[in-house]
Structure formats: structure tokens, C-alpha cells
Amino acid sequence: MYNTWLVIASITFVGCLWNSQLTETSSKSCPTECICLSQTQVLCNTGGLEKIPLRQLPATVENLALTKNNFPVIKPDSFAGLRALKKLSLDGNNITKVKQFAFRGLPRLKELSIQYTPLQSVTSFAFAGLQNLSTILLSHNQISRIETHAFAGTSNVKLILLSNNPLIKIDTSAFSSLTNVGHVIFPSGIRTIEPDAFNGMDTVGLLKLAYMDLKEVQPFTFRGLTNVLLLTLQESDLGIICTDAFTGLSQVETLQILNNKIDSIEELNFTYTANIKHLKMHGNHILETPDPNAIIVDGVEHLQLVNNHFPCGCHIHTLLDGPLVEGGHNLSEFLQKNFCISPLDVNGRSMIELDIDAIGRCQDQLTKGNLGSSASSMALSLCTLVLISLTTNHFVKYLVFLLVLGSMTVPHDTYS
Ligand SMILES: *[C@@H]1O[C@H](CO)[C@@H](O)[C@H](O)[C@H]1NC(C)=O
Ligand SMILES: *[C@@H]1O[C@H](CO)[C@@H](O)[C@H](O)[C@H]1NC(C)=O
Ligand SMILES: *[C@@H]1O[C@H](CO)[C@@H](O)[C@H](O)[C@H]1NC(C)=O
Ligand SMILES: *[C@@H]1O[C@H](CO)[C@@H](O)[C@H](O)[C@H]1NC(C)=O
């Protein structure tokens, strides 16, 4: 009798327990389209969701995947209330717009992934308010533009991945207020970087700009960019490096200019205030000899010029007497490690193979009065060519330059 009562009592107790568990589970419900692996991990992948099921999600969720649904627009405060969220994936959605403050109210979010979507631009203040964000993955989208203040309101970001986007333009202040950034990885094919594009970026690990097709590196492109471990411009057509291109860039551990084609260098001015520790110019094809008066490398601690190609016509004397060669190397080392781009008969040859003394000085160096007009007419024709050949293919453009350069320098040689 006593035993039976005990059994009944314990069944009732277990039943109550069961019941209370049930009600508790339903209060922390899981959206029907999702799988709640736990109260902290929710997967809503390929669920055919049309809107974010904010109310049905457990407020404790830390890891939320909403991939391959159908959210065309991520509205302001789309995830408000998910204060525990650390990792959010919106990959593979039909996202065309992320509105400003879309992710506001997520103080703990560390990783945000929006990849493989048709997203075309990064709106101003899209990521504002994400104080703890360390990774922004934006690869494989259709981003062609990063608007001013796109990343405003985020700092301490370790990685911004922008690879595999048709990005052609970086607007002024696109990266403003991004302090303490680890790596920013850009896609190939950038055609315009506006002045002050990186202004306000402070304490950056790696800023890598590769495979660009620029008409010019505009004045003040890098102004306001400070404390950079490594800034690298590589495998690109840099066009003309304009006066003041690097003015306002300061405290750089290493600036690399690697394997680029450079039509001309109007000015390269690194004074002591720039404080560039290493300037490495490797493997570049520089089509025009820079004016020695326009090159200042006093503020560079270690200058390294290796495997570059320069014109070896009459202007070679200007180069060899100039600060680029003086600043980094002794003459014989420079001649050993750098090559000729023109005239055509010495193209690709190491400079050490040349009989430098047998190369006459240019006419403009002999009759100094001529210097200004000759240099400017050359620059003018290069600029015109840049414009004309903007749409033509890279290789053809390059050949045209070679030919024009050859024809320009050869007559000067024969003159003297
Ligand atoms: C994506 O969104 C666009 C515009 O909102 C819509 O026309 C299109 O049908 C959507 N595609 C898919 C696969 O949902
Ligand atoms: C931000 O992240 C750090 C390190 O992971 C953590 O200690 C801190 O509590 C986080 N801040 C917030 C508001 O959660
Ligand atoms: C180089 O930069 C310094 C300071 O930024 C400036 O005062 C100087 O005029 C510049 N020199 C040339 C040749 O542009
Ligand atoms: C120049 O550099 C080369 C190679 O580094 C070295 O062998 C040579 O002694 C140097 N010459 C002078 C004059 O410093």
C-alpha cells in the first residue's frame, strides 16, 4: 500500500517535471524553419525564410547561421535583442542592401559573414555600433563601391575580407574611424582610389592593394593613414604617381611597391615626418626617369631597389646621379640588380652590362633651358596615351608605351 502510494507520487512528480520542462522549452522556442542545436547555437540554413525570425529565436543564441534564405534587405536593427550573439552568417542570401545600423545592438558580435550574395555596395554606417567585431567577411559578393564611413563605428577589427568583388572605386574616408585593424584584403581590379580614401585609419597591420588598374595614384591618396606595419602596392598598373600621392602617410614600418607598372613618378616625397622605416621597390617597370628634384627619400631608413626596370637612354645619367640610387645602394650594386626597359635594343638587360660612359647625356641636360618644356611635353604625351588606351588591353598598352619611350629617348642619344 505504502509502496503503491510512493509509485503514484513519483509518477506525478516526474509528470510535473516533464510538464514544466515542456513549457520551458516552448518559451525558448525554436523557429520551425531552424534547427536549434542548443540554446546558443541555431541553424536556419535553406529554410526559405523571408524575414529574420527574431521573436522565435532564443535570446541566448551565440552562433546563428541564416544562410541561403531570402532576405533582400537587412533593415536597421534587424537583430536587436540578440545581445549574446557572437557569430552571425548571412551567406548565400538574396541580399541587395544592408541598411545603416543593420546590426545595432549586438555588443558581443565577433564575426559577421555576408558572402556569396548579390550585395553591391557597403552603405555608410552599415556596421556601426559593433564595438566588439573582429572579423567582417565580405568576399564573393557584387560589391563595386565602399561608401564614405562604411566601417564607421567599428574598431579593433582584425580582418576585413573583400576579395572576389568587382570593386572599382574606393571613396574618400571609406575606412574612416577604423582604428586598430589587422588585415584589409582588397579584391583585384580597383580603378580609382579617391584622395583620403584611408584617412582616419590608425594602427593597421596589413593593407594590401594588388591587381589594380589605376590611371594614377592621386594626390593625398594615403593622407591620414598612420601606424602601418605593412602597406603594399603590388602587381598593379599604378599609372602616374602624382605629386603628393603619399603626402600625409606616416609611421610606416614597411612600404612595398612590388611588380607594378608605373608610367611616371611626378614626385616621391618621404621626409622625416613620414617616418618610413623600409621602402622596398622591387620588380617595377618604371617607364619614365623621375626628375631627381622630385625625389626625396630622407625620411626612409632603409631603401631597397631591386629588379626594377628603368629607361636606359640618355636619362640614365639623371637616374644614377639621383637620390633613388644614392639613397639605397652603392652604384655597382644598383647596376647589378636593376634592368633596362628602353631603348628596345637593351630592353631586359641588366644595367651592369651597359657602357654607361658611352651613353650620351640628354639634350635637355646639356641645354638646361630646355628641361621644363621637354619634360612637360613628354608627360603630356604620356597622359594622353593613358586616356586613349584606357579601354585597350593591358599588354597592347604596355607595348605602345615601350615603343613611344624608345622613339623618344633614341633621338636624344644620337643628338649628343
Ligand atoms: C531576389 O530578390 C529579387 C529582388 O527582391 C527578386 O526579384 C528575386 O526573385 C529574388 N531571387 C530569389 C532567388 O529569391
Ligand atoms: C568583447 O570581447 C572581449 C574579448 O573577447 C570580451 O572580454 C568583452 O567582454 C566583450 N565585450 C562585450 C561588450 O561583450
Ligand atoms: C616634401 O614634403 C615636405 C613636407 O611634407 C614639404 O615641406 C616639401 O615642400 C616637399 N618637397 C617637395 C619637393 O615637394
Ligand atoms: C658595393 O656593394 C657590393 C655588393 O653589396 C659590395 O661587394 C661592394 O664592396 C660595395 N662597394 C662599395 C664601394 O661600398
Image (cartoon, rainbow, N blue to C red):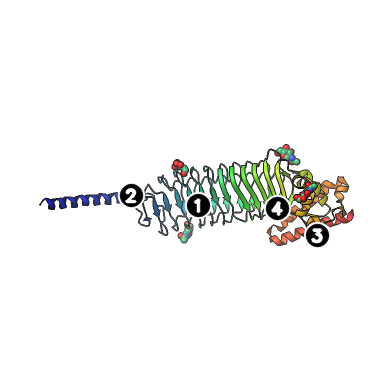
Q: Position of residue 193 (x, y in %)?
A: 64, 49
In the picture as drawn, the residue positioned furthest to the top comes out as 273
Q: Are marks 1 and 2 in contact (CB under 8 Å)?
A: no
Amino acid under label 2? Lys
Q: Amino acid at mark 1?
A: Lys
The answer to whether 305 appears left or right of 131 in the picture is right
Q: Which mark is residue 346?
A: 3
Residue 294, how many percent across, how many down? 76, 44
- C-alpha separation, residue under disc 4 versus residue under disc 2: 60 Å
Q: Which mark is residue 97?
A: 1
The crowd level at tag 1 (other Cα within 10 Å; few <14, some 14-19, many 20+) is some
In this view, the residue in front, 145 or 307, is 307
Q: Is mark 2 within 8 Å of ligand 2?
A: no
Question: Quick check: marks 4 and 3 in contact, CB under 8 Å?
Answer: no
Tag 2 secondary structure: loop
Number of the front mark, 3 or 2: 3
Residue linked to disc 2: 28
Q: Residue furthest right?
A: 416
Q: Nearer the viewer, residue 284 or 224?
A: 284
| Residue tagged 4 | 282
Dot 3, crowdedness within 10 Å: few (<14), some or many (≥20)?
Answer: some
Ligand 4 closer than 8 Å to label 3 CB: no
Report helix, strand or loop for mark 3. helix
Q: Earlier in the sequence, mark 1 or mark 4?
A: 1
